[in-house]
């Protein structure tokens, strides 16, 4: 009986710590939810909002490959530059190993990767501000195969104004932002967003 109480107490404490850590990270960030651009409002966080009026310019005018290009290393030390992926659809996800919602959606990202790895879709999961070994151990333990990029200093996540994680950007073959979603996505929703990309 005492052992059961100890286990439940430890589980509750872990949940509280995880929630506190996530909220603390989000509260400390003063940046918005989409890359800034003059006179361009932030893109809608949900597909339902996408049909609403967005002001004088639309989100399609935000070219991430041109205006928000970046180069990061993957876990093998290879440099990946976003603009070099022009002509391909890009699923750009920001995450961290300590983030429960990030971990919850990663099995579905792996499924999407396995289903689309021979297509024109490129999945890039950008880890925010964690050391390489921590990320490598997490990926190896969970047997994920999709490409992981290391944003060790958090500079790219700041450029993209990521204030909550996971955050995912869907980029079309010309480099334009099609949509951005804050929060975990189930596999079917991932496929819907990817299928909309041109």
Image: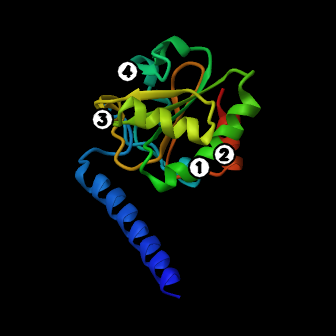
Picture residue at 43% right of the left edge, 72% below the top: 10
Q: Which residue is mark 4?
A: 67
Question: Between marks 2 and 3, how big is the CA–CA gap?
Answer: 25 Å
Question: Between marks 1 and 3, how big is the CA–CA gap?
Answer: 22 Å
Contact (CB < 8 A) between labels 2 and 1?
A: yes
Question: Between marks 2 and 4, how big is the CA–CA gap?
Answer: 29 Å
Contact (CB < 8 A) between labels 4 and 3?
A: no
- Badge 4: few (under 14), some or many (20 or more) residues near its Cα, within 10 Å? some
Closer to the observer: label 4 or label 1? 1
Left or right, 33 with respect to 182, comes to left
Question: Between marks 4 and 3, how big is the CA–CA gap?
Answer: 14 Å
Of callouts 1 and 3, which one flags the residue occurring earlier in the amino acid sequence? 1
Residue 160, image x, y percentages: 36, 34
Residue 52, image x, y percentages: 52, 51
Query: Quick one: SS at disc 1?
Result: helix
**Vertical position of residue 155 compared to residue 55: above or below:** above
Q: Is residue 41 visible?
A: yes
**Vertical position of residue 30 compared to residue 73: above or below:** below
- Badge 1: few (under 14), some or many (20 or more) residues near its Cα, within 10 Å? some
Query: Quick one: SS at disc 3?
Result: helix
Viewer-proximal residue among 103 and 170? 103
Of callouts 2 and 3, which one flags the residue occurring earlier in the amino acid sequence? 2
Q: Which residue is mark 1?
A: 105
Viewer-proximal residue among 97 and 56? 97
Colouring mode (rainbow / by chain / secondary structure / one colour): rainbow
Q: Which residue is mark 2?
A: 108
Looking at the image, which residue sits at the far front? 2
Q: Disc count in the image?
A: 4
Q: Which residue is mark 3?
A: 158
Viewer-proximal residue among 27 and 128? 128
């Amino acid at each position: 009986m005492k052992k059961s109480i100890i286990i439940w107490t430890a589980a509750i404490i872990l949940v509280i710590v995880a929630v506190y850590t996530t909220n603390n990270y989000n509260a400390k960030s003063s940046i918005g939810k989409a890359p800034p651009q003059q006179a361009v409002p932030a893109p809608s966080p949900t597909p339902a909002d996408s049909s609403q009026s967005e002001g004088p310019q639309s989100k399609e005018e935000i070219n991430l490959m041109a205006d928000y290009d970046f180069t990061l290393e993957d876990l093998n030390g290879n440099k990946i530059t976003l603009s070099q992926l022009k002509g391909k659809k890009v699923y750009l996800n920001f995450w961290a190993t300590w983030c429960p919602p990030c971990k919850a959606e990663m099995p579905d990202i792996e499924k999407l990767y396995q289903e689309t790895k021979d297509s024109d879709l490129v999945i890039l999961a950008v880890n925010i501000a964690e050391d390489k070994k921590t990320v490598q151990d997490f990926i190896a333990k969970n047997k994920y195969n999709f490409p992981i990029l290391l944003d060790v200093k958090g500079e790219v996540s700041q450029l993209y104004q990521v204030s909550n994680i996971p955050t995912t950007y869907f980029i079309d073959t010309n480099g334009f932002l099609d949509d951005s979603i804050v929060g975990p996505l189930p596999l079917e929703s991932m496929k819907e967003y990817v299928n909309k990309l041109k």
